[in-house]
Amino acid sequence: MPANHGQPDRNTWALVGLRIAVGVLFLIYGEYKVFGTKFTLGGGFQYWINRFLEGGCYPFMVSVLRNFVLPHGTAIAFLVAYGELAIGLGLVLGLLVRTASMFGVLYMLALLFSSGYPGPHAAFWQYFGGAGEHLVLALCFAAFALGKADQALSLRAYLRQRSSPGL
């Protein structure tokens, strides 16, 4: 950033654009779950956990899903719904981006291991084929957490600028 007198460069704008796009996706994911009741109270969450258990779940996740997640399904459904909404808000607004991103990585890894198992005799490359939809978002979240994705178009940058107007 130093070459253009404190103004964000192209890489920053690209990261910010991706941050906001992923944030909007998570706002959409969380919105219908929070403001509708099918996912949280109507058994939608439990439906997906049972689908994961029927096929595609990594073996080490079976007991976690069966013995912990399903018995606490409604509470965890609310945690997922509000978590997705919070991640989306954090990314779109540019507040607590690193925190939101770390939770995003954990969430994507939980989904990956719950639904992306290609089977015990799959070729190595097939593990990545089944993980694509969650792995790509996990990598985006990792980039947001490690980079400076809140440097531009963020409430944090705006507040920082307002607190030190002479700089």
Image (cartoon, grey):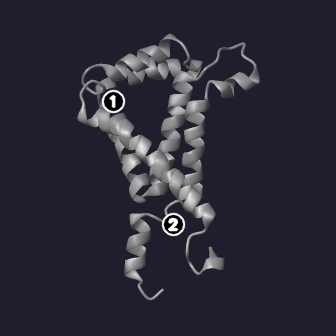
> Which residue appears at 50% of the width and 48% of the height?
102
Query: Residue 54: x percent and y percent?
Result: 49, 10
Rate crowding at label 2 as few (under 14), some (14 to 19) or many (20 or more) other CA atoms within 10 Å.
some
Indicate the amino acid at tag 1: Ala
Percent x, y for residue 133?
Answer: 56, 31
Please give the name of the residue rendered at 53% of the width and 22% of the height, measured from the top-left corner: 115
Task: State the image coordinates of residue 32 (x, y, percent, origin top left).
Answer: 30, 34
Q: Quadrant of residue 15?
A: bottom right
Task: Say what amino acid the circle numbered 2 marks.
Answer: Gln
- Label 2 vs label 1: CA separation? 32 Å
Tally of marks: 2
Whether residue 72 is visible here, answered yes or no, is no
Up-down relation of residue 19 to residue 63 (above or below) = below
Residue linked to disc 1: 77
On the picture, is 150 further left or further right than 140? left
Secondary structure of the residue carrying tag 2 is loop
Is 48 located above or below residue 13 in the figure? Answer: above
Q: Which residue appears at 48% of the width and 45% of the height?
A: 22
Q: Is residue 97 visible?
A: yes
* Disc 2: which residue: 151
Q: Nearer the viewer, mark 2 or mark 1?
A: 2
N-terminal label among 2 and 1: 1
